[in-house]
Image (cartoon, grey):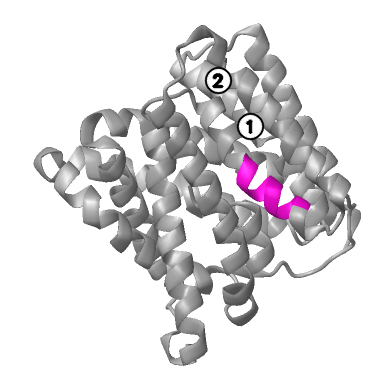
């Protein structure tokens, strides 16, 4: 490849940052839709729009599905739907940065356990201290339901990563998402349709379609490009910045101003996430669906 050709492709870290910004912007803008159709209605509309987009891009490989694949595919779809529902329910009650930081405990814990090193468990513990600083329980203003929804989202994200391994080994790229996102949309529909039914308009449908582009379609494309030049661990280190991006977008879009202890909490969560990852750049490789999806779930 010529130097001119290489210069036309953004740096891998810039692609990863762009993906995180798209995720957090989509989350921040979802707050307006939550006010119109509720968190469950927003989850259903956004996942349905995302499912339609992925189905339009890639035909689901139904003929390739083996009986042994069915439990993992269904489990991954259900985990995605429940994770999206819980995160948006948390977003209705607590600031964006706090919700992202709590949910980030899920993949951070999975990474620590997978390392098979006892000292790696120190990083989720450090992040948990950061979450305490973010929620500031000493002020007595903690929304326990909001924190609970975010914690459930953390469990869902952890399950998503584990289930993605099997599905990602069998179905690559967008084909895996064309299987699982429709299932997630069906899960969200159980509570989302009744919640949104009386408020649906063409404007709301258009807004949901735009949010689906921001999350998960655009991030998936950017991450797929980034992971061709970064190891999953290096990408995971960059992903540790996501709670900080949540705070920044919460401030800029939602005017959620963090206190000084909350800023300290975010710093601890970001540091813990970065410290739990090691790795570097690789020359060229094809990213698997497992690497992409484990790095960024369609919240």
Say left or right for 117 vs 84. Answer: right
Pointer 1 and pointer 2: residues touching (CB < 8 Å)?
no
Crowd tier of the residue under label 2, counting other residues whose Cα lies within 10 Å: few below 14, some 14–19, many 20 or above: many
The numbered disc on residue 243 is: 1
Q: Is residue 67 above or below residue 19?
A: below
Q: In this view, does 253 lie above or below 60?
A: above
The residue shown at (49%, 15%) is 256
Q: In this view, does 80 lie above or below 14?
A: below
The residue shown at (39%, 69%) is 55
Query: Of callouts 1 and 2, which one flags the residue occurring earlier in the amino acid sequence?
Result: 2
Per the image, label 1 sits on a secondary structure element best described as helix
Tell me, yes or no, if residue 10 can be seen here.
Answer: no
Per the image, label 2 sits on a secondary structure element best described as helix
Q: Closer to the observer: label 1 or label 2?
A: 2
The question of residue 109 being in magenta is answered with yes
The question of residue 106 being in magenta is answered with yes
* Placement of the N terminus among the 4 image quadrants: bottom right
| The quarter of the displayed image where residue 88 is located | top left
Start-end of magenta stretch: 105-112
| Depth check, front residue: 152 or 263 | 152
Say left or right for 156 vs 45. Answer: right
For disc 2, the marked residue is 135
- The x, y position of residue 60, in whole percent, is 43, 78
């Amino acid at each position: 490849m010529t130097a001119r050709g290489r210069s036309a492709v953004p740096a891998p870290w810039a692609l990863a940052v762009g993906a995180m910004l798209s995720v957090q912007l989509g989350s921040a803008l979802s707050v307006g839709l939550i006010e119109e159709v509720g968190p469950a209605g927003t989850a259903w509309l956004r996942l349905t729009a995302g499912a339609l987009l992925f189905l339009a891009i890639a035909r689901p490989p139904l003929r390739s599905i083996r009986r042994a694949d069915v439990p993992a595919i269904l489990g991954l779809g259900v985990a995605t739907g429940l994770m999206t529902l819980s995160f948006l329910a948390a977003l209705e009650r607590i600031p964006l940065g706090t919700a992202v930081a709590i949910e980030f405990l899920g993949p951070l814990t999975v990474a620590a356990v997978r390392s098979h090193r006892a000292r790696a468990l120190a990083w989720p513990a450090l992040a948990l201290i950061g979450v305490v600083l973010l929620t500031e329980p000493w002020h007595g203003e903690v929304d326990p339901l909001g924190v609970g929804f975010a914690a459930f989202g953390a469990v869902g994200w952890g399950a998503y990563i584990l289930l993605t391994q099997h599905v990602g080994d069998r179905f690559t790229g967008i084909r895996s998402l064309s299987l699982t996102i429709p299932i997630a949309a069906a899960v969200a529909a159980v509570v989302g349709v009744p919640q949104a039914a009386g408020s649906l308009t063409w404007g709301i449908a258009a807004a949901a379609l735009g949010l689906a582009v921001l999350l998960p379609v655009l991030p998936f494309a950017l991450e797929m490009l980034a992971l061709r030049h970064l190891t999953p661990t290096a990408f995971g280190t960059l992903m540790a910045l996501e709670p900080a991006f949540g705070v920044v977008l919460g401030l800029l879009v939602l005017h959620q101003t963090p206190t000084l202890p909350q800023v300290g909490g975010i710093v601890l969560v970001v540091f813990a996430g970065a410290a739990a990852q090691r790795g570097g750049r690789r020359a060229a490789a094809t990213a698997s669906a497992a690497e992409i999806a484990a790095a960024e779930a369609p919240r």
